[in-house]
Image (tube, rainbow, N blue to C red):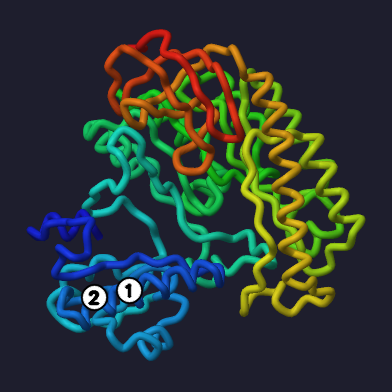
Amino acid sequence: MMGLLHGAGHEIVSDCALADAAVINTCGFLASAARESSREIAKLIVLKRAGKLKKIVVAGCLAQRSGGALLKKFPGIDSLLGLSAEGGITAALKTKTVRVDAPPAALCAPKARMTATLPHSVYLKIADGCDNRCSYCAIPGIRGPFRSKPVEDVVAEARALAANGAREISLIAQDTTLYGTDLYGKVSLVRLLRELVKTKGVRWLRLMYAYPDRIDDSLLRFIADNPKICRYVDMPVQHASDHVLKLMNRRSTQESLAETVRRLRRIRDMALRTTFMAGFPGEMRKDFKILKDFLLREKFDSAAIFAFSPEKGTPAWALSGKIPAAVRNRRADELARLQSRVVDGLNRELAGKTVTVLMDSPSCGRMESQAPDVDGHVEIQSSAPLRAGDFIKAKIVSARGYARKAVFVSKLP
């Protein structure tokens, strides 16, 4: 949408006080995300009533999921664009538009693109939608079935991003490990990666949102043999109890998850990120203990931890054995404390090591084990001038939680 607006002659500003129109791209698959989106919409409506905005356009998942109900709640919205209606953004600034469309049957490269991140580190969507049907998740009902972007489109987009200064590309989808099944009749992630590693100027390709039971030997071999693929896999496991995993409609078992972790760890310097969910309906104390023991034993480098959020319209909404919110939150807090202990141990091993860092600013950057936005940072002490986008070698001198400090050693070409 930003690319289309820029191409149509609109100027993108970050301060709403300077804008004629505001476009909010919403998340809506969790109740907490819907509340956050609603708060932002309410703020924009206050500005519009004060005469500081002429138009408010709401797009994205909440627009798709809530539709007319959102317009009733916020009559100050001028236009509502569903998931396949982003091409109507320029028209939405001229007229009152309501378009809540079903997700498209095919996914292709965007007609225009303006990166919202720093130009050296960007996200590249390789697929959208999901076929996994986890019982707690509303995404299939919002974003539709899994759809891959053709290899040639992904490669062309990567080249364009590299030409604009990208040195790190994070590959994203609801399930990156399912890539290509809809287009080519089989999983084709390695086929895609084989083309992407040829992208000149890009040093790191990062794999996000990998489904644990689809991480096969061919993918592991490709990661091990290609230095451009980060020794980093984001692999949401959600739980470790076979009982809870079955209720979640996950294919994994505790044994299969542990085996996948072992296979990944055979790759030297491999870092693993995951997601844990506490308080799922039917989670008994023994299930929670299994999860805690798994967390402590497998020692993930980074973990996002959530209390279960009941979402209307999902199978989990109707499950028996519901756990009170206070208990869900208490269990999530306990998992967070245990993960903190894990990270403290990993930090002790990290002290004194020399690592590669991608600078996000003249004073802060990230190791290969740290994805943008979610895994913390490294503060660099250096007398040499550094810029965002520089790759350097640095020696870790201290670490607390996900914030590390290091001294500059040398620049990399």
State the residue lying farthest toward the right.
286
Q: Is residue 186 visible?
A: no
Instruction: List the residue tagged with mark 1.
Output: 43
Q: Residues within 10 Å of mark 1 (few under 14, many from 20)?
A: few
Specify whether 257 is left or right of 196. Answer: right
Instruction: List the residue tagged with mark 2.
Output: 47
Kindly indicate whether the residue at mark 1 contacts the one at mark 2 (C-beta within 8 angstroms): yes
Q: How many marks?
A: 2
Kind of residue indicated by mark 2: Leu
The answer to which quarter of the image holds residue 137 is: bottom right
Q: Secondary structure at mark 1?
A: helix
Q: Secondary structure at mark 2?
A: helix
Q: Disc 2 to disc 1, how far (Cα)?
A: 7 Å
Q: Position of residue 3 (x, y in %)?
A: 20, 54
Q: Is residue 385 visible?
A: yes
Q: Position of residue 260 (x, y in %)?
A: 73, 36
State the residue lying farthest toward the left.
9
Q: Position of residue 217 (x, y in %)?
A: 66, 30
Q: What residue do we see at 26% from left, 79% from top? A: 79
Name above or below for residue 151 compared with residue 31: above
- Quadrant of image for the C terminus: top left
